[in-house]
Image: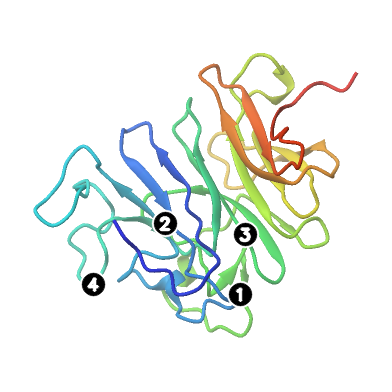
Amino acid sequence: MVVPQPYQNHNGGSIEFGNDGYLYIAFGDGGARNDPKANGQNRSQLLGSILRIDVDQKTDNTAYKVPTDNPFVGVEGVRPEIYAYGFRNPWRIAFDRKTGKLWCADVGQDLWEEVNVVNKGGNYGWSVREGAYTFGNRTPSAESANAIDPIWAYDHSVGKSITGGRVYRSDRLKELEGKYLYADYVSGGVWALTLEDGAKEAVRNEEVVAGGLPVLAFGQDAQGEVYVMIDSGKGESILRLEQDK
């Protein structure tokens, strides 16, 4: 799969295997500011979307196959690989290994950084909306009026570039069990979100690290332990959270 990028930023780029065995691929809107090509809401191409493909199968034209239960299979003018759309720069996606929920952190532009739980076929609003609000002077379309709100968002007084993380599933730090860890690359803060079953927004956001930790990504091992990846001149780039003594 080769997807042309019109600009140098907003590449997204996370890939994750879901609990269903399919590969999920997160693409940004193609870059620049204000989504100049309106890719976020254009389902005839692959940018600004999360894709879902079967890499164990192939067709005469592709080295993969589109699962037959993808939400837009058979819809005229829509790429069938698309699982959900309306993203600006989904900087890290991750599955909760226990529940199978797909989490996505989407980097904002002017005001809002957001955390989404991704639903099959969902429209997450960009670039008609940023977070849960109308973006700039864009006129909402009938379709974008049904866009899904983030389960959590914060403004640029808190941080300016969200880094999506993982749901903590280790029993080492029981205070974090079941919570979604995420960070902001600019402010260096790390937080833990609590989302209750069936809720459409997080009920609690707890500070884990006050600041100074420029997190690029999170990883997770077979025991559910979550690790923090940072850019370090010393080469000490993979960290584990510890309780403050």
Question: Which of label 4 and label 3 is nearer to you?
Answer: 3
Distance in Å between CA atoms under marks 3 and 1: 16 Å
How far apart in space, not on screen, are marks 2 and 4 (Cα)? 17 Å
Using the rendered view, name the quadrant where residue 238 is placed: top right
Alpha carbon separation for disc pair 1 and 2: 17 Å
Q: Nearer the viewer, mark 2 or mark 4?
A: 4
Q: Which residue is mark 3?
A: 107
Residue 77, disc: 4
Write the residue at 56% across / 75% down.
32
**For residue 81, what is the image quadrant?**
bottom left
Crowding near the residue tagged with mark 1, few <14, some 14–19, many ≥20 C-alpha atoms within 10 Å? some
Q: Amino acid at mark 4?
A: Gly
Q: Earlier in the sequence, mark 1 or mark 2?
A: 2
Judged from the image, the secondary structure of the residue bearing numbered disc 1 is strand
Spot the residue most to the right. 245
Please say which color scheme the image uses. Answer: rainbow
Q: Nearer the viewer, residue 42 or 1?
A: 1
Q: Which residue is mark 1?
A: 134
| Gap in angstroms between the C-alphas marked 4 and 3 | 27 Å
Q: Name which of mark 2 and mark 4 comes first in the sequence.
A: 4
